[in-house]
Image (tube, helix red, strand yellow):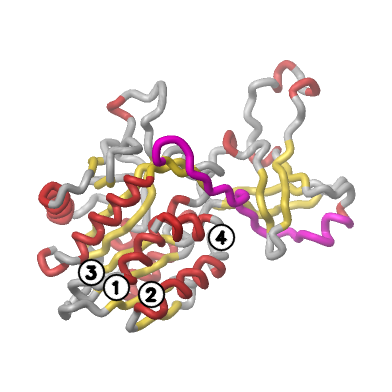
Amino acid sequence: MLKLTEKLCGLYGPSGLEDEVRDAIIGEIKPYCEELYTDKVGNLFAFKKGKKHADKPVLFAAHMDEVGFMLQYISDDGYLYFDTIGGIDSSVIGGRRMVIGENRLLGVVASKAVHLQKASERGVCLPVDEMYIDIGCITKEEAKKYVSVGDCGVFVPNFEKFGDGFIKSKAIDDRFGCAVLCTMIKEEREYDTVFAFTVCEEVGCRGAVSASFALRPSVAVVIEGTTAGDLPGVSEARRACAVGEGAVLSVMDGGTVYDRELFDKAVSLAKANGVKYQVKNTVTGGNDSRSFQTGAEGARVMAISAPVRYIHSASNVAKESDLTEVLNLARLVADNGKEL
């Protein structure tokens, strides 16, 4: 699964442009599905036949898109102005490299050198609308040969292992979740199961809205990355979750109040099978669960998340053991589908 996570993290897929990621997933899972299709907005749905029939198969979902950037304006001197796709803090953008458009053009988010800054500018993070990208052009005409307004970019692929079982990459949120689903599809399942790889989660969970109406699940389990706050200066009461402490189960977040029976079932399965887990202790963030809970007739929802530091940046940090625990718990939930 880690190898697949690395492969998927390296792909280009900002919200609305998930084609490359979807094609790679299709290549991974096509031989293992009874049914595989894409809807009008780009969601990918897979049906996996289990050893036993399920009248209402449990749905597992993960989103394919990542945060990114859209070009808004090309200046006379060849610099590109942009806005963000999804929630990116401007403090993690300056000086970063990105790839832009179909040709994966390399760009660098430019900034004024410290010795050129006025005293009032030093130590101040620029807002996004004052940042610009340098692509090595010196005129608008030259830049327009390579890019156009409306082109989109993402952080440069940068997957690495480091430390004691840690990994760093762009787009761990939520390419690791896609890797979990792919792994589950390749395995034998106890019951019939439905899988959804959704689009546009980072810009309002839009793909999951369409998926909720198309699939009308009774139970939806979202596999996701969530913000870990185990950092210096953050009190334990506000850390949400910690890297290395296992899969994260949520009671409530900024978009969803999770089904308590499903939460209790997941806790019970984790305890009975030695799966390391933790409970998210802040009501923050959100994911596709809200769209499944409120879309169509509604659904009972559960989120199984991996704790990820520096989420929505060029360098998400996670621990391999946590990703494995998320997969282990998802397997248990899937194969106890009749009891949910």
Q: Are marks 4 and 2 in contact (CB under 8 Å)?
A: no
Q: Residue at x 31, y 58 (%)?
A: 222
Identified at 40% across, 21% down, the residue is 233
Q: Quadrant of residue 283?
A: top left
Q: Which mark is residue 194?
A: 1
Task: Give the amino acid at mark 4.
Answer: Leu
Quadrant into which the C terminus falls: bottom left
User: In this picture, which residue range is highlighted in magenta?
Assistant: 141-165
Which image quarter holds the N terminus?
A: bottom left
Residue 173 in the image: above or below residue 91 = below
Looking at numbered disc 1 in the image, what kind of residue is underneath it?
Val
Q: Is residue 57 left or right of residue 112?
A: left
Q: Is residue 35 visible?
A: yes
Rendered position, 7 above or below 33: above
Q: Residue at (89%, 50%) from the top-left corner?
A: 139
Distance from Cα at disc 4 to Cα at disc 3? 28 Å
Q: Which residue is mark 3?
A: 58
Q: What residue is shown at x 38% (from left), y 33% (from top)?
A: 229
Residue 4, given in percent of the width and then of the height, sits at: 45, 60
In this rendering, would 227 be left or right of 40? left
Residue 168 vertical placement versus 125 (above, below): below
Q: CA distance from mark 3 to mark 2?
A: 13 Å
- Name the spot of residue 15 as percent of width and height, x first: 53, 60
Would you say the residues marked 2 and 1 are in contact, meaning their CB atoms lie under 8 Å apart?
Answer: yes
Residues tagged 3 and 1 counted as in contact (Cβ below 8 A): yes
Camera-nearest residue between 25 and 133: 25
Q: Amino acid at mark 3?
A: Val
> Would you name the residue on which mark 4 appears?
11
Q: Cα distance, mark 4 to mark 2?
A: 20 Å
Query: Label 2 belongs to which residue?
Result: 45
- Farthest residue in the top direction? 119
